[in-house]
């Protein structure tokens, strides 16, 4: 059996303490430093990841804001283009109506002028025909030497000449 002796007991305690010291010095300290470095590394990585996430979110917000601004500008451009197109359409319609009205007025004036010329030509022809008839009647009447008829014909001729 194992016997208990005091010197062995002290030797075992010293041996235990030396083993603890060696383990502390050569095993625990390097492992503790490694764990500490690892913990610091993880914490710094977490901080860096957090900063990158915040930066990414800030970028995302900035891009979303830029996208909204671009959409707003695009809508403004489209709205201005629509308004400009509508204005141009109105101008073109107004110009077309003015041109059509001018053509209509010109045609109407030409028609009135042609009508006036036709009426004047008709009057001239009628006057010539009447003068021819009157002159023939006068010739016939001069042959008969009727003074009353001659005066009536003269008044009639004066009226025709003044009409012309």
Image (spheres, rainbow, N blue to C red):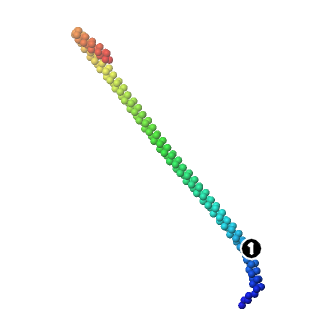
> Is residue 156 visible in this depiction of the protein?
yes
Quarter location, residue 100: top left
Q: Pick whichever, 126 or 37, lies toward us.
A: 37
Q: Is residue 69 above or below residue 93?
A: below
Quarter location, residue 112: top left
The spot of residue 98 in percent (x, y) is: 42, 34
Left or right side of 16 for 139? left
Between 100 and 142, the one lying in front of the other is 100
Q: Please report the residue visible at 69 percent of the width from the left and 67 percent of the height from the top.
A: 37
Count all numbered tags in the image, as a single digit: 1
The secondary structure type at the circle numbered 1 is: helix
Image: 38 above or below 141: below
Q: Which residue is mark 1?
A: 25
User: Percent from the top left, x then y, of residue 53?
Assistant: 60, 59
Which residue is depicted at the point 31% across and 22% down? 122
Query: Quick check: can you spot residue 135?
Result: no
Quarter of the image where one finds residue 101: top left
């Amino acid at each position: 059996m194992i016997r208990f002796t005091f010197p062995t007991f002290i030797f075992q305690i010293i041996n235990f303490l030396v083993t603890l010291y060696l383990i502390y010095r050569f095993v625990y300290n390097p492992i503790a430093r490694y764990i500490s470095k690892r913990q610091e590394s993880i914490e710094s990585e977490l901080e860096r990841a957090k900063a990158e996430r915040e930066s990414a979110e800030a970028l995302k917000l900035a891009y979303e804001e830029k996208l909204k601004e671009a959409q707003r500008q695009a809508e403004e451009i489209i709205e201005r283009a629509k308004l400009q197109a509508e204005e141009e359409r109105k101008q073109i319609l107004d110009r077309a109506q003015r041109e059509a009205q001018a053509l209509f007025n010109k045609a109407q004036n030409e028609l009135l002028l042609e009508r006036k010329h036709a009426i004047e030509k008709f009057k001239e022809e009628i006057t010539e025909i009447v003068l021819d008839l009157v002159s023939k009647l006068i010739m016939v009447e001069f042959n008969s030497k009727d003074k009353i008829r001659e005066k009536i014909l003269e008044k009639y001729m004066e009226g025709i000449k003044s009409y012309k």
